[in-house]
Amino acid sequence: MSQKTFASAADLEEKKVTFERLSEHAWAYTAEGDPNTGVVIGDDAVLVADTQATPAMAADVIRRIREITDKPIKYVLLTHYHAVRVLGASAFMAEGGQQIIASQDTRDLIVERGEQDKASEIGRFPRLFRDVESVPPGLTWPTLTFTGQLTLWLGRLEVQMLQLGRGHTKGDTVLWLPQERTLLSGDLVEFDATPYAGDAYFQDWPQTLERVAALQPLALLPGRGPALRGAQQVQQGIEGTRAFVSELWDSVRAGVAAGRELRAVYEETFARLQPKYGHWVIFNHCLPFDVTRAYDEATQHPNPRIWTAERDRQMWLALEG
């Protein structure tokens, strides 16, 4: 295998942003496979789900919200703890935001590994963190946490925040608008974009996706990729994510059972998945992290180990060097 540029270091091309209506109260901010942001406009306030990587990037989300409503942006939901999802939060709080909401599991992960993750992700995604100096010192902390389910009422609009199980992380939260069957999935679901699984629970993720599907969404904003509309397209997104996660896990587990070392398992898994998924956004970036986590889970680490900038580089050298 030819050596690849580390993570997304070579990804410097600007992405085209789309801001479109997903359902009566939900809007989708997408950018050709970059992390998505969801916007819910209620009767009296706005909620933003996932904040972009920096306040400078969040400012573009705010500008687009202001083109369609002058209602206050009161709430921010963190679907999970990753830096590209949370470090833009201060921009929304400066707009009058009142609560940063997350699952208690997500807060626990910020306590345990937030600093290391922040440094790790800034190193992986130079384009997304190009305005990193706009991020305030320290970490982004939830002001309101919950376990299982939290229901918020934006006037007459019911907004459910649900923990349906572990998958992309142990703290994954989806946002569900039951009145219009619209789901903002965070990185539990991707579309035409490779799931990042460095902090995943491979044995849980497919079952969690079954619970996502059981809601029977008619519209879904994935963590990356275009907004999905209609039951068939939504199902395609859920099933595509499930297939990738399951096929990667099966490949790694077979390699471990055969007694092969991590690099050999990685090369076999890359060769197996690349023909089907290689065209997905950030495939080359994600696969070393994904296989390393799956190998850990299949051997001696039921819970994800902490990624640091140094561990990132050592792993990449071991698998791609």
Image (cartoon, rainbow, N blue to C red):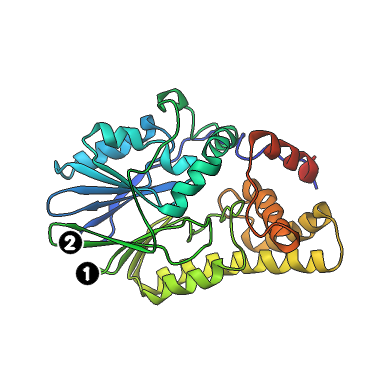
Label 1 Cα neighbours within 10 Å, binned few <14 / some 14-19 / many ≥20: few
Residue 97 percent coordinates (x, y): 24, 39
17 left or right of 294 in image: left
Disc 1 vs disc 2: Cβ atoms closer than 8 Å? yes
The answer to whether residue 2 is seen in the rendering is no
At label 1, which amino acid type do we have? Gln
Q: Quadrant of the C terminus?
A: top right
> In what element is the residue under mark 1?
loop
Q: Give the quadrant of residue 277.
A: bottom right
Q: What's the residue at 60%, 39% (across, down)?
A: 8
- Left or right position of 162 against 204: left
Tell me the residue at 54%/64% (across/down). 241
Name the residue at the right extreme. 259
From the top left corner, tell me how far across and down residue 35 is, in percent: 45, 46
Q: Is residue 236 left or right of residue 99?
A: right
Residue annotated with mark 1: 179
Q: Is residue 211 above or below residue 61?
A: below
Q: Earlier in the sequence, mark 1 or mark 2?
A: 2
The label number, if any, that marks residue 157 in the structure image:
2
- Give the vertical position of 157 relative to 94 (above or below): below
Up-down: is 221 above or below 100? below
* Residue 188 in view (yes/no): yes
